[in-house]
Amino acid sequence: MFDLFLNLYHFLWAFLSALFSGFPSRKMKVIGVTGTSGKSTVVDLASNILEEAGYKVAVLSSIKIKVGDKEEENLFKMTMPGRGYLQSFLKRVQREGCQYVIIEVTSEGILQHRHRFIDFDTAVFTTLYPEHIERHGNFENYRAAKGKLFQSVKKLHILNLDDKNLNYFLSFPAQRKIGFTINGWQPVNSAQENIEVVRADNYQEHKDRIIFRVKNTEFSLNLIGKFNIHNALAAICIGISQGVSLEICQKALAKISGIPGRMEVVIKNPCKVIVDYAHTPDALEKVYKTLKLQLTNQKSKIICVLGSCGGGRDKWKRPILGKIAHQFCDEIIITNEDPYDEPPTEIIKQVFKGIPQERQKTAKQILDRREAIKEAIKLARPQDIVIITGKGCEPWMCVENGKKIPWDDRTIAKEEFEKLKDKLFIAD
């Protein structure tokens, strides 16, 4: 009974918020991007493409809140804010005369009906892996929550054809469907024959960029990692769906120097220090695999700093994160991340359990995240890579009793490097 009441509360609050704001989403084109990872990057890349095409664009993502040329950090520690804020944001977007708004849509937001009474023209699916399992009960429920966005959007679906959950998302009807792939894709039944396919050919991963072709247009982006080819393709599909040429897409993406907190290089020399948001097993593995390609010689090392979110969320993944760090990293430091009301030392121990016993002697457990980052930098030698994952560009660390501590992994890494740089890299 309580769950039913709570569900009704969220639904009514969504309706009343939209009603009070005058249903502003009806007066613009709204694009919703959902998936386990890649959402923020796709939102950023797509907004650049639409702006390059001459449109006025608004963005609401875990990284930023942007309306036209006015931009600010998302300080909510919430990817998809509450219904009241969402509708007032859309009202502001309407007043500013934006033709497009691109929103990150989360499974939690869908559970709480935050997507309701927003007239999405387009739904974009990036990729899907287990996450928020405690919240949803199982992976199927998590996937079903994502699916509700596609169920509600009847005009355009943009889909990752290389994801193993593709058929589930294809099951929802839409007037138009566009799919993107780097593996090549062929329809297996008549229902799939009407999907427009955008394929990346001749893709290459370099130490400082990714290169690929779509039809006769070559794209070169200042991003690294094969996963960012998928993200770029999703953004290109958004552009194509709105009549933007490949040439304009190419020009827009070439201008992007990086995405905040997503494989962001905060120190380049003599070692690299990189900050990334990866906090799921799949994302972490992709990050580490990408960095293996970045190593310049056999003696170069990957030194990782990682933790795991607390608050009762996704406890199953903690030892898996430790195991992945063992598989790919030469030095491992496990630290505090966002413990909320869980004892942070217990979270660290659970990540540590995923590391084989013979390796546990050298892996470090450092509760203070600043000290952990400092220790990683101290361990580094020229041409090593320090990778700090879990928070990206998040502005807070969430601890017990709802307290939020101002935080930025990028700033702290730079501060500790400046303190240490005169003492580092002394020949052994």
Image (cartoon, grey):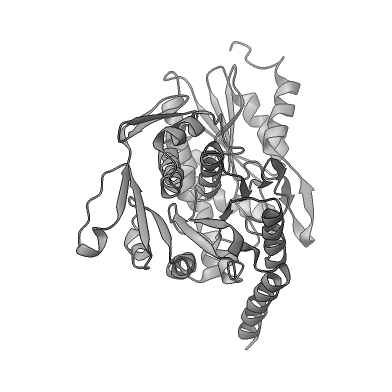
Observer-nearest of 27 and 152: 27
Identity of the residue drawn at 70% across and 27% down: 414
Observer-nearest of 353 and 372: 372
Q: Can you say which quadrant of the picture contains the N terminus?
A: bottom right
Identity of the residue drawn at 48% across and 34% down: 329
Quadrant hosting residue 11: bottom right
Quadrant hosting residue 12: bottom right
Asked if residue 218 can be seen in this view, the reply is: yes
Numbered disc total: 0
* In-image side of 40 versus 368 (left or right): left
In this view, the residue farthest toward the left is 189
In this view, the residue farthest toward the top is 427
Q: Position of residue 321 (x, y in %)?
A: 50, 48
Q: Can you say which quadrant of the picture contains the C terminus?
A: top right
Identity of the residue drawn at 47% across and 49% down: 281
Identity of the residue drawn at 54% across and 27% down: 385
Asked if residue 328 can be seen in this view, the reply is: no
Q: Position of residue 80 (x, y in %)?
A: 63, 58
| 265 versus 299 height, above or below | below
Observer-nearest of 259 and 265: 259
Q: Position of residue 404 (x, y in %)?
A: 77, 52
Q: Position of residue 3 (x, y in %)?
A: 62, 82
Observer-nearest of 352 and 268: 268
* In-image side of 284 versus 60 (left or right): left
